[in-house]
Image (cartoon, coloured by chain):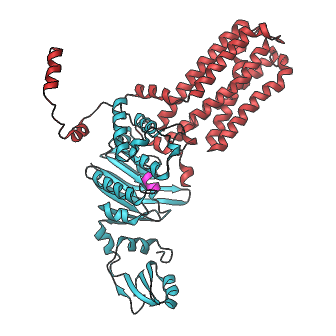
């Protein structure tokens, strides 16, 4: 229909008021969102601080890798990895606490009984945060790989071990305690791992030497397993729907 | 439309929170009455899939409580619930709508409509942390209705509301019960008395009564007494019988008591009310 004519008709005749609109809308089977829509929607609910810290860490990694020789007289190249790996526990801390957010803020009971239940919320959050962390770690490895005297595998292990240890400990604490105490526990664990990096910096050369690589690999495997076990435990907890037992016992 | 509970049992170690509860609910309002620790919240949590029964099954039109389709038909207001601190009322509603699988546009429309219904439209963009207890409760009720649920389970929905709001909610719940199953628990006996078509009474994890108000009350008919007694007798009577009402009348005291036998010579049997029944079963004086 001609647009002008349409407008003229609209202005000439008043549209009738809707009759029984409520009932009609109730009977309307509007399409529900898909799992993919739900997954995408969860991006909005990851707090900005996680993304800000991720960008900041990536930037610090880039600055340490490429700008530092101009401004700082680095003791050795390995120290760059050491410094970056001391920052990563804080990323792990934010990630772990973000995954457990529902429990901190007593949202579990509401989330469990929704169509996309708590276990799906946690899986979506874990996937999003895991993806974000993966990108940050990949970027850091790329930066470090270009200036490090170590092989990429070695650099990856040295960089990831403090991150994985913190992740594992935080998830362990979060799965066993509730409320703000667990948050303090996680913060303490992250600080401890980070400070340990600083304390052992004098022995860094020795720790990064080839004979010690096997120990790094062992810690890497152990902390990865701990994370795997904790994620499995978390999902099992939500599937068994026992998160709120503390409220009833 | 039928919600069936078949021998639903929940154990916490040696403690039995719910003991073989079997029920069939059809559209209408059901009021769940019971003292603290009677097992009301545990039962409601199992009906919402928050807790897994130790034994028994819960189905809605044949759909098990653990299925997504069951949750899709469910609206739930927990006794206590939290919120993410950065959320405004509207953010909270939209977040729950996302979890309930409601598309974005529809969610915004529905959230605004429900916030208006619970008189929170002006506070839609305010942070929940600034809300009073009653406002949070209203928000909780609003979120439970986002998906237009066929099963609506409300654990203490009127707690923290002022009398005016309570009456509004009672009327709203009454209307909602016309085409869905509404189960509500409360300590406020008058709320149940006014809106529940069927009353369920729980004690020590067991369902001891179920039926319409008149049927339930019939069980204590002839056991409610009123008398005017001298001050000196009051203490001894109140020790033996749960007192529902006590008022000074000159030098004497008016008492309304519940008991199997006539408490004193001057006592006369009067018509029972739901509150009398509640006290009869749940008073510490008369722990039956």
Colour seen for chain A? red
User: For residue B89: magenta?
Assistant: no
Q: Can residue A63 be seen in this view?
A: yes
- Report the residue at 62% width, 22% height from top: A54
| B153 in relation to A160, above or below | below
In front of the other: A137 or B160: B160
User: For residue B43: magenta?
Assistant: yes
User: Which is the main secondary structure of the residues drawn in magenta?
Assistant: helix
| A92 in relation to B208, above or below | above
Horizontally, is A226 left or right of A116 in the view?
Answer: right
Q: Where is residue A126 in the image (x, y as percent from the top left)?
A: 55, 29
Badge count: 0
Q: Position of residue A35 (x, y in %)?
A: 41, 28
Residue bounds of the magenta highlight: B41-45
The cyan chain is: B
Q: Where is residue B177 in the image (x, y as percent from the top left)?
A: 29, 53
| B250 in relation to A168, above or below | below
- Check the picture and name the quadrant holding the N terminus of chain A: top left
Horizontally, is B166 left or right of A173 in the view?
Answer: left
- Report the residue at 56% width, 56% height from top: B13
- Check the picture and name the quadrant holding the C terminus of chain A: bottom right
Horizontally, is B49 left or right of B85 in the view?
Answer: left
Give residue B196's quadrant in the image.
Answer: bottom left
Q: Is residue B82 visible?
A: no
In front of the other: A162 or A227: A162
- Report the residue at 65% width, 37% height from top: A172
Q: Where is residue A222 in the image (x, y as percent from the top left)?
A: 69, 28
Tell which residue pokes out farthest to the right in this image.
Answer: A202
In front of the other: A13 or B28: A13
């Amino acid at each position: 229909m001609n647009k002008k004519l349409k407008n003229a008709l609209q202005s000439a005749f008043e549209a009738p008021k809707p009759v029984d609109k409520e009932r009609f809308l109730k009977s309307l089977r509007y399409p529900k969102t898909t799992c993919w829509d739900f997954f995408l929607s969860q991006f909005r609910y990851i707090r900005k601080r996680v993304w800000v810290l991720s960008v900041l860490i990536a930037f610090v990694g880039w600055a340490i890798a490429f700008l530092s020789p101009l401004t700082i007289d680095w003791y050795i190249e390995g120290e760059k990895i050491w410094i970056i790996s001391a920052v990563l526990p804080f990323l792990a801390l934010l990630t772990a606490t973000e995954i457990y957010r529902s429990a901190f803020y007593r949202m579990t009971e509401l989330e469990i009984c929704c169509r996309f239940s708590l276990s799906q919320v946690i899986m979506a959050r874990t996937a999003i945060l895991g993806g974000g962390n993966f990108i940050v770690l990949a970027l850091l490895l790329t930066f470090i790989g270009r200036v490090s005297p170590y092989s990429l595998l070695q650099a990856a292990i040295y960089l990831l071990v403090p991150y994985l240890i913190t992740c594992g400990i935080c998830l362990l604490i979060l799965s066993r305690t509730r409320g703000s105490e667990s948050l303090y526990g996680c913060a303490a664990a992250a600080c401890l791992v980070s400070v340990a990096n600083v304390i052992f910096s004098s022995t860094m050369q020795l720790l990064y030497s080839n004979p010690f690589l096997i120990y790094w690999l062992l810690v890497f495997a152990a902390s990865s397993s701990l994370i795997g076990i904790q994620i499995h435990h978390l999902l099992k907890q939500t599937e068994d729907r026992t998160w709120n037992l503390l409220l009833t016992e | 439309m039928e919600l069936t509970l078949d021998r639903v049992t929940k154990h916490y170690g040696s403690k039995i929170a719910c003991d073989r509860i079997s029920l069939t609910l059809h559209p209408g309002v059901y009021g769940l009455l019971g003292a603290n620790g009677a097992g009301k919240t545990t039962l409601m949590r199992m009906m919402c899939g928050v807790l897994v029964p130790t034994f028994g099954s819960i189905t809605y039109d044949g759909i098990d409580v653990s299925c997504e389709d069951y949750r899709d038909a469910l609206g739930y207001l927990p006794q206590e619930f939290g919120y993410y601190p950065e959320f405004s009322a509207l953010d909270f509603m939209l977040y729950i709508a996302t979890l309930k699988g409601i598309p974005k546009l529809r969610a915004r429309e529905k959230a605004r409509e429900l916030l208006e219904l619970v008189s929170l439209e002006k506070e839609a963009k305010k942070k929940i942390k600034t809300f009073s207890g009653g406002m949070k409760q209203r928000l909780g009720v609003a979120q439970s209705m986002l998906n237009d649920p066929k099963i609506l389970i409300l654990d203490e929905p009127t707690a923290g509301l002022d009398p005016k709001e309570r009456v509004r909610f009672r009327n709203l719940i009454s209307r909602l019960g016309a085409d869905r199953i509404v189960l509500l628990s409360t300590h406020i006996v008058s709320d149940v008395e006014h809106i529940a078509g069927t009353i369920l009474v729980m004690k020590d994890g067991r369902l001891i009564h179920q039926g319409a108000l008149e049927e339930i009350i019939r069980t204590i008919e002839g056991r409610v007494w009123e008398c005017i007694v001298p001050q000196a007798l009051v203490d001894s009577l109140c020790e033996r019988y749960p007192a529902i009402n006590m008022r000074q009348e000159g030098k004497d005291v008016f008492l309304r008591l519940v008991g199997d036998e006539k408490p004193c010579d001057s006592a006369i049997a009067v018509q029972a009310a739901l509150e009398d029944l509640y006290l009869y079963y749940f008073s510490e004086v008369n722990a039956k």
